[in-house]
Image: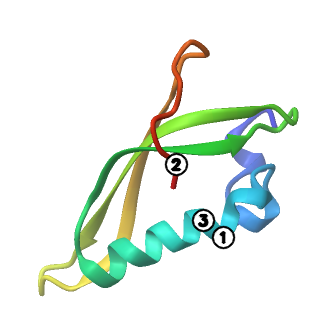
Amino acid sequence: MTGDGQVIGKDDYQLAWVGQAEAYRANDRAVMVTGLAKLSFEKPQTTPDGRLTWLRTSKVPLRNKDVEIIRVQGMYEEMPDTSKPTGAC
């Protein structure tokens, strides 16, 4: 993938990390159901060229003016090759 246009409108099942899609969705569901942020955890991701890399990830619930959870905000950083994951999603 070379740009945002190749990702916009697609879900996890349509992208290179399809093998991790269910785990990603489970993490999102847990945040939505509990309302608790999941901070600084490590998870694997398959890159478009087929490499397995590790991401340090945080997910937080976003709420509307009525304090209802309306979506999950996810942030991540790719871990350096020298980093060893201490736990996975």
Q: Which residue is mark 1?
A: 22
Q: Which residue is mark 2?
A: 88
Label 1 secondary element = helix
Does residue 29 lie above or below 62 as drawn?
Answer: below
Does residue 84 lie above or below 23 as drawn?
Answer: above
Residue in the image at 52% along x and 48% along y: 88
Does residue 37 lie above or below 54 as drawn?
Answer: below
Tell me the quarter of the picture where residue 23 sits. Answer: bottom right
Give coordinates of residue 19: x percent, y percent. Answer: 78, 59
Q: Which residue is mark 3?
A: 23
**Amino acid type, label 2:** Ala
| CB atoms of marks 3 and 1 within 8 Å | yes
Placement of the N terminus among the 4 image quadrants? top right
Residue farthest toward the right in the current orientation of the protein: 49
Crowd tier of the residue under label 2, counting other residues whose Cα lies within 10 Å: few below 14, some 14–19, many 20 or above: few
Give coordinates of residue 86: x percent, y percent. Answer: 45, 36
Q: Earlier in the sequence, mark 2 or mark 3?
A: 3
